[in-house]
Amino acid sequence: MSLPWILFLPLLGALPALTRPYRDTPGPQWLPLLPPLLALGLLLAQGPAILGGDTLSQGWAWMPQLGLDLALRLDGLGLLFALLILGIGVMIQWYAGYYLSPKENHGRFTGYLLLFMTAMLGIVMADNLLLLWLFWELTSLASFLLIGFWSQDSDARRGARMALTITGAGGLALLAGVLLIGQTVGSFALGEVLAAGDLLRASPHYPWILSLVLLGAFTKSAQLPFHFWLPHAMAAPTPVSAYLHSATMVKAGLFLLMRLQPALGETPAWALALTGVGLATLLYGAWFALLQRDLKGILAFSTLSHLGLITLLLGLGQPLVALFHLLNHATFKAALFMGVGIVDHETGTRDLRRLGGLAALMPLTATLTVTAGAAMAGLPPFNGFLSKELLFAASLESELLGGLNPLIPLGVVAAASLSVAYSLRLVHSLFFARPGGEPPEAHDPPRGMLAPGLMLAALCLLVGLFPMALAAPLVMAAGQAVLATPPPALNLALWHGLNLPLAMSALAVAVGVLLMSRRRLLEQAFQVFGRYDARRLFEQAMIRLTKISLGITQRLENGSLQRYLALLLITALAMAGLGLSRLERLTGELALQPLDGMLVLGAALMIFGAIGSALSHRWRLVSLLMLSVVGLSVSLTFVRFSAPDLALTQLSVEVVSMILMILALFFLPQRPPRWISTRRMFRDLAVAGSLGLLVAGFNFALLTRETLSIANFFLRESVPGGGGTNVVNVILVDFRGFDTLGEITVLTLAGLATFKLLSRLKLFMPAGNVEGIHWSSHRHPMILAVVAQILLPLALLVTVYIFLRGHNQPGGGFIAGLITAVALILQYMARGYEWTRERLPVAYNLVAVSGLALATLTGLGSWLFGYPFLTTTHGHFSLPLIGDFELASALLFDLGVYLAVVGATLMILINLGRVTTVHRPRVEEH
Amino acid sequence: MEALFSLVVGVLTASGTFLLLRGRTFPVIVGLALLSYAVNLFLFSMGGLNTDAAAVIGDSTAPSDPLPQALVLTAIVIGFAMTAFLVILAVRARSELGSDHVDGKTGEERGKG
């Protein structure tokens, strides 16, 4: 199967293009042309089968959880579009080789173009709505790059940005629509969505789905009122305009409408929206095309008009005619853009008033442009004539608007007249009228540059002459995909007999010629209305939007941590309060336990400490002492409520953090200035008070209710599975060892970070305390030094004991590590950094890291035995003197924890302590 | 007893929050410490407030829920790591910015909160 090849081959061409980006002589890069040509060949090889009614599909699961599959399909509709994309794409690539000057970066241009080609192929070949949307966004991005290719030009940058904003916003709307479709249908697969048309149309979401999808389609296809980006996109190099903004990308919206017609179409809302918007765009585009002075401007507005026409045809329920006209428009408009591009390239201007009389100078270019222009005007015997006749016939048949039905044929004839007028004007003033200024010196470009345009122009004529042979099979196959039923017979012929559509054509030509000759009058009439500049409106809107969002951002994000915290806390308060307010009763069903004196005393201590530390926050040492009262009471609370491990941990952490904070106080102002407003104080008190109340209520509600627990699993499995009776420790080193590993990693990282933060620190070294009293000259009191020295071996012995028994009795790596750290810190405090450093030359960062490594390796070790990461084992051993004991591999893991805790804690404290010493050797090294 | 326990947790939270909203680094650190006590006690109480029921097999007939204890144990150590980092950060910020205001403002400059 070749579907992925057709899709991705073109992208391969970017490689040779980018390796040799610059050209010596004008002309296309040959090698990058081959992959898209090959893809075109593959596509053509599939042609006969698809024309016969087959649908090819091929897919791979990509993200099945999201419903996103890399699923491709090729049916009649896809074939028609893919032919346009690849066929015109190759011609444009060829033409651009001549159009860009050899000094420009051809490689980049070709790369963007091929990226766009792939994205576009992806849209038409996607068999999954999410995939379709992905490619849809990719075309917006590629189009942005292509419009802004001449990025030195501010118009190009603005045009690119505007196109991206509009089509990108439309893409988001489309995504929302697609998600709603997926939710309604239960799948994003195109086949299932298309088969679920009745379900979708009956769904209550249908109005939303329809509006969102139409938003996507209308922005992409530049329908009113989202049309204004298209004329500004003309700042792109002309090959880009020819390819993206007439032949392919703007047709993606129409493709989407056709693709989803079986799922969403055939409702009054659908028909009315498409008819109304289509008719408005048709007339608007045709009118403004007549008033343009810029060659590309005429073509841009004419493209708007024709896109509106195709939308109108879809609204009228004529997808076959719509498809036929889409094909015709792509051929004649691409040819016209190429012709105009040649004129621009050769004369250096696109201003109609300065051009004229080029027919004699550039006969071949004139032939090309006149042919395509006649097709655009809808003159026989060209293809545009055929589709215009069919449009007239369709407009007469419509009964959509009831009493207002005649509006449709009237509008269509008016637009056709305008189209005749602007086509005539373009051709006439370019080639036959006398030039306004100096006659330009120009001649036909190399044959190579003319070839693609001439081929397309010839196609316009051939399709006009032999429509049944050249276009009908393709249109029928595509129509089958749009209608989901065998389409009605399509009779394409130049001569339909004398009938009303023919009369309408004649009328349109007559009025068109008249309009063209009285154009001056029209222009003057137009001046009265003043100029309505969509771009200025758009840019003003963008500036206003930017200002509003900037205002919101600055209000929310004013650089004040206090404000952020207050906002965060208030939000948390509101959310949690809302949740808690749903409780019927605060008190649950459990019986309350009685109080005793010790509990009341403990609680009073904690409340005293907490409030005290809050009130005395300007007297920092006092505040800290109050905090330590709370900390110690917390560890007593753990003792009281049967958590010896927690109590031990809390106690040792308390000691370490108090020392750390006192050390830090040395570097921070002792007595900060008074700095508060009463209003702020009240706000903070209110936030703090209500949060406290909320937490207390929440806690009480939970404490008095029965909760589900998985405790029994751990209690049951602790001894047989983990080989230890201290369930808390077994959980830490065995059941949830991975958590613990993560935790010691965090601890080590914090240690390393403080190490880094303290290097090259500029110091504030106060010589005395806040009252101006100098620090004591007895830096290392004798008694402390002696006691510390005696305590060290005892403390280390306790550490070993606590560590070894940890698996079965309260203790373990964490607690042992903290006790070791405390004992060592005491040595530093008693003797000073240098003295201890000489006798204990240990690099604590290495200790921490090796602990982490040991724990990780223990975990990895279980892989050697074919078990998952961190599986533990245990067994009984006996040693003389000590007797029988149990050893678990978790002990090794716990040793890693121990080392990491010792290393990290000392790293933090010793590094901070070191900078307080007078000599500060490390700081001076730097 | 449950009411008293909740009251203590509530007071710790309120005091911590109040300190958290101060403008200088040191009270903020103290506030965070108070808040982490409150959070730890709260989490711990999810296993119930049991007397003489350490989660050691063979020590008691109805051991407490060991899981909240294990979680709180790690929370204490992580809380220490966080506090330590903040303390050092505050010291560093003071030496770099010359002020211990949380937003790096100097002197008597008034903050818009």
Image (cartoon, rainbow, N blue to C red):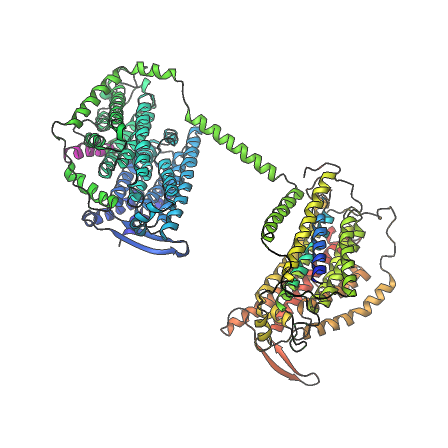
Q: Main secondary structure of the magenta part?
A: helix
Q: Give percent across and percent down for residue A812.
A: 67, 70
Q: Name which residue lies at 67% across and 43% down.
A: A562
Q: Which residues are magenta?
A: A453-466
Residue nearest the observer in this picture, A237 or A834? A237
Q: Quadrant of residue A703?
A: bottom right
Q: Is residue B36 above or below residue A740?
A: above
Q: Residue furthest left?
A: A497
Q: Quadrant of residue A32?
A: top left
- Left or right of A784? Residue A498 is left
Residue nearest the observer in this picture, B103 or B96? B103
Residue nearest the observer in this picture, A561 or A915? A561
Count the marks: how many? 0
Instruction: Please identify the quadrant where the N terminus of chain B is shown.
Output: bottom right
- Left or right of A114? Residue A504 is left
Q: Give percent across and percent down for residue A74.
A: 26, 49
Q: Give percent across and percent down for residue A451.
A: 23, 33
Res A758 visible: no
Residue nearest the observer in this picture, A909 or A559? A559
Q: Residue furthest bottom?
A: A880
Q: Name which residue lies at 28% across and 33% down.
A: A312
Res A395 visible: yes
Q: Quadrant of residue A891?
A: bottom right
Q: Name which residue lies at 68% across and 52% down.
A: A693
Q: Is residue B17 above or below residue B105?
A: below
Instruction: Please identify the quadrant where the C terminus of chain B is shown.
Output: top right
* Residue A630 belongs to magenta span: no
Q: Give percent across and percent down for residue A580.
A: 60, 53
